Amino acid sequence: MSKKIRVCQIGLGRTGKEISKVLLQQDDIELVMGVCSENSPKIGKDLGEILNTRDTNIIVDSCSNLEENISKYKPDVAIDFSSPEATVRNAEILGKMKVSIVVGTTGFNEIQTKKLMSIAKNNNIGIVHAPNITLGVNVLMVLSNLAASILESYDCTITEAHFKGKKDAPSGTAKKIANEILKGMNIHNDIDVHSLDYNDIPIHAIRAGGIIGKHKVILAGEHDKIEIIHESFSRTAFALGALKAVRFVHKKAGFFTMNDVLNLRHVISRYLEREAHFRKQRFFNTEVPKDQLSI
Ligand SMILES: NC(=O)c1ccc[n+]([C@@H]2O[C@H](COP(=O)([O-])OP(=O)(O)OC[C@H]3O[C@@H](n4cnc5c(N)ncnc54)[C@H](OP(=O)(O)O)[C@@H]3O)[C@@H](O)[C@H]2O)c1
């Protein structure tokens, strides 16, 4: 059997805990580290106690001992779901120690995102930047892009809803969907993607109760409308996306997105190839049997 991928989970909040539970169930992955913030009450506890599961023999430690613990437990990949400042700080250490990273944290400013890119480049490690880690929401983005490119004159609006305490509003995912819509709307224009401003698409953010995550795109014309909705029922959806990203980035160098992980470009080109194939089939099967010619 091939060697297991050794994983370090950074950030043991709502999402990090769910990811840890799923990581502990994988045959090809070994969770070797759990990392919390500097003054967290989680320091020194068995990860199992934090997850409400059996003991794991993984003792949670502070991010201030990250370098030392990486030398000791030798993870191949780290998953970070903490805060933007913490993620950038941790990434500097992970890069130096040649550990690839799946970044699930959202809310980075432009400078922080560039910093992550340069950490990947300068240290020759892999970073998956995944502000939208579920498969479903990535499909929603592709569909929104396609719909906006076809329904050019329609008005597009995004609504997103998350739990009360979510720090960033609008969500990173909603901004990314807005960019996809703008890319779709400008399909015939020669544009610089960096010039796209997500503020051009209205986004309504709702923060209420325990809503895990919902994004809705409305494309409304004068006479009809389309709605594309993605809703996460549980944080397991995030964990499954993180797993895919870990397997993808292991032993790779570069700065990637979930589009690379899920290979959606390949799916779309395959769809177009098959449509062309069926069209050709229909065209060459147009011969009508002689006895039916008079019908
Ligand atoms: N990409 C996606 O699809 C997706 C999905 C869900 C959430 N997110 C993002 O992931 C992040 C976390 O979300 P969440 O809902 O899990 O938030 P949360 O419940 O607040 O958890 C964040 C955790 O990070 C820990 N932390 C803070 N600083 C740290 C550091 N320096 N090193 C290690 N851990 C540190 C925090 O505290 P303690 O260690 O002190 O306990 C806390 O447990 C947010 O940015 C959120 O928007 C992204």
Image: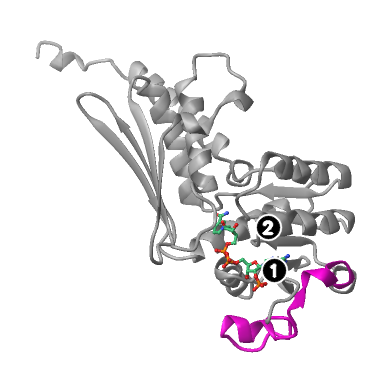
Splitting the image into 4 quarters, where does residue 22 fall? Answer: bottom right
Does residue 25 lie above or below 118 as drawn? below
Q: Is residue 247 visible?
A: no
Q: Position of residue 93 (x, y in %)?
A: 85, 58
Work out which quarter of the rendered image holds the C terminus and state it: top left
Splitting the image into 4 quarters, where does residue 192 fall? Answer: top right
Q: Which amino acid is tagged 2?
A: Val
Q: Nearer the viewer, residue 246 or 282?
A: 246
Q: Earlier in the sequence, mark 1 or mark 2?
A: 1
What residue is shown with label 2? Answer: 246
Residue behind label 1 places its C-beta within 8 angstroms of ligand 1: no
Work out which quarter of the rendered image holds the N terminus and state it: bottom right
Whether the residues at callouts 1 and 2 have beta carbons within 8 Å, the answer is yes
Query: Which circle marks residue 29 in the picture?
Result: 1
Closer to us: mark 1 or mark 2? 2
Q: Callout 1: helix, strand or loop?
A: strand
Residue at 44% in and 25% down: 277
Residue at 62% in and 87% down: 49
Q: Quadrant of ligand 1?
A: bottom right
In the image, which residues are magenta? 42-69
Q: Which amino acid is tagged 1?
A: Ile
Q: Callout 2: helix, strand or loop?
A: helix
